[in-house]
């Protein structure tokens, strides 16, 4: 993918601007790391791209929000790390695709507040009750940034790797054509099974717990 193609698309009113890109050899194959800067903030979002996306239909795409606790510290309280790995593996085996990594930790409430929510969960609150007790909504994440990144990458339609119907609706509201949904797979464990059940029951996540393997 050429930098010239990407730089030709942004307009001054865009929420993000392309800042850097380079080849990135990974265990999932050779990808391209493309960094977008969010205008008016210090946030940098990154997308890992396989192949050429411009003008393509049904491009496999994962829109993934940062989860330092699982992806760096190895937390077992959620399935974020495994969902990210599943998406990267799927993209690596495909002709083309992208994983968009958004810097919006803890469903948008930030790392410190996420850990405060974890403390409340340790005392019996579920993930949504904990957020509300801290004065936040159930989910403060936004997807207009991801939609603009996709627009600059030039895919005509995507196959979204997700279990979250709200994410599909949010991207479609921003003009992204979602051709179909690809289930996002991850293992359950004794620490995240309640969290996954709560997501399914409270916000309609399409999680088939019976079909997922349970780790020891």
Image: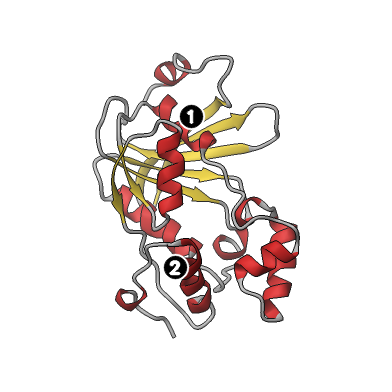
* Quadrant placement of the C terminus: bottom left
**Quarter of the rendering containing residue 54:** top left
**Residue depicted at x 28% and y 25%:** 55
Where does the image place residue 159, in percent across and percent down from the top left? 30, 44
Q: Position of residue 213 (x, y in %)?
A: 34, 78
| Quadrant in which the N terminus appears | top left
Residue shown at 52%/39% (left/top)? Answer: 46
User: Which disc, if any, is residue 200?
Assistant: 2
Residue at 70%, 34% in the rendered image:
42
Viewer-proximal residue among 165 and 111 = 165
Question: Left or right: where does residue 172 sit relative to residue 191?
Answer: left
The secondary element bearing badge 1 is classed as: helix
Residue 115: image location, x then y, percent: 71, 65
Label 2 packing within 10 angstroms: few (<14), some (14-19), many (20+): some
Can residue 107 be seen from the camera position used here? yes
- Give how far apart the Cα atoms at labels 1 and 2 are: 28 Å
Q: Residue furthest bottom?
A: 216
Which-is-in-front pick, marks 1 and 2?
2
For residue 68, which quarter of the picture?
Answer: bottom right
Relative to residue 206, is residue 135 drawn left or right?
right
Mark 2 lies on a secondary structure that is helix
The image quadrant of residue 200 is bottom left
The residue tagged 1 is 148
């Amino acid at each position: 993918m050429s930098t010239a193609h990407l730089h030709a698309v942004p307009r001054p009113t865009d929420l993000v601007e392309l800042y850097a890109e380079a080849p990135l050899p990974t265990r999932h194959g050779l990808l391209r790391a493309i960094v977008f800067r969010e205008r008016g903030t210090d946030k940098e979002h990154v997308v890992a791209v396989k192949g050429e996306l411009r003008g393509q239909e049904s491009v496999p795409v994962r829109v993934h929000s940062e989860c330092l606790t699982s992806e760096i510290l190895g937390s077992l309280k959620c399935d974020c790390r495994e969902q990210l790995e599943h998406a990267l593996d799927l993209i690596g085996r495909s002709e083309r695709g992208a994983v968009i990594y958004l810097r919006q930790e803890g469903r948008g409430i930030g790392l410190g507040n996420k850990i405060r929510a974890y403390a409340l969960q340790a005392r019996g609150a579920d993930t949504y009750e904990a957020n509300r007790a801290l004065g936040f909504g159930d989910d403060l994440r936004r997807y207009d940034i991801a939609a603009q990144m996709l627009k600059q990458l030039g895919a005509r339609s995507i196959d979204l790797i997700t279990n979250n119907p709200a994410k599909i609706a949010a991207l479609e509201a921003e003009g992204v054509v979602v051709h179909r949904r690809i289930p996002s797979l991850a293992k359950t464990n004794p620490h995240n099974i309640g969290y996954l059940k709560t997501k399914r029951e409270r916000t309609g996540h399409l999680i088939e717990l019976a079909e997922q393997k349970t780790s020891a």
